[in-house]
Amino acid sequence: MILSVILTIALAYIGYGVYSLIFGEIIRNIIYNTMIVLLGFQFFKPLLYLKLAEIKKYFIFGMYQIGERILNQLKFQIDQILIATLAGTHVLGIYNFSINLVLQPVKRINPVVVKVAFPFMATIQADNRRLKNAYFLLVKLI
């Protein structure tokens, strides 16, 4: 910390202005992380160990996750992709503005309704019939 303060003041004195704060913070982080690494090696020495057979199931799971997220993103933006390719960016801009205008009330009201409805639903969670009716009412309201 002392080194970074001295460096910051020296750079400001030389004329670096606001950039002296940035350089001082960068130097502080470099010194701090170097000290952590050097002191950490005294207690723990990491090993480079990799067996593909052991990570295969995690890799496959990750690939399914990536595939699912790509498909979801494509599902939610296929209309925009089609409009952009078929009608052009001007029409896409109008479409996006219209969609955002329609969705604004839902985006603004939904969090408020959920904050109020969640505690209420928690109190009736034992009664499935009331919980189901409350949920359907909430969906209809939103």
Image (cartoon, rainbow, N blue to C red):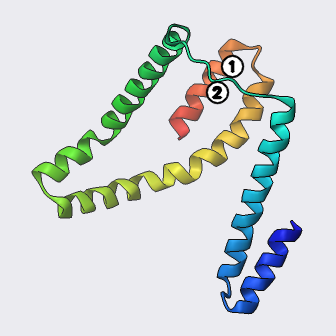
Q: Is residue 110 above or below residue 89?
A: above
Q: Is residue 46 above or below residue 39?
A: above
In the image, 36 versus 75, the foreground residue is 36
Question: Picture coordinates of residue 62 (x, y %)?
Answer: 48, 22
Residue 70, quarter of picture: top left
Residue 130's disc is: 1
- Give the residue drawn at x 77%, y 34%: 119
Question: Picture coordinates of residue 26 (x, y %)?
Answer: 69, 65
- Residue linked to disc 2: 134
The image quadrant where one finds the N terminus is bottom right
- The 10 Å Cα crowd at callout 1, few under 14, some 14 to 19, many 20 or more, is few
- Give the residue drawn at x 22%, y 46%: 81
Q: Is residue 142 left or right of residue 23?
A: left
Q: Is residue 50 left or right of residue 93?
A: right
- Give the residue drawn at x 76%, y 51%: 34
- The 10 Å Cα crowd at callout 2, few under 14, some 14 to 19, many 20 or more, is some
Marks 2/1 in contact by CB < 8 Å: the verdict is yes
In the image, 14 versus 84, the foreground residue is 14
Element on which disc 2 rests:
helix
What's the amino acid at mark 2? Answer: Ala
Residue lying farthest left? 86
What's the amino acid at mark 1? Answer: Arg
- Give the residue drawn at x 77%, y 22%: 124
Question: Picture coordinates of residue 40 (x, y %)?
Answer: 83, 37
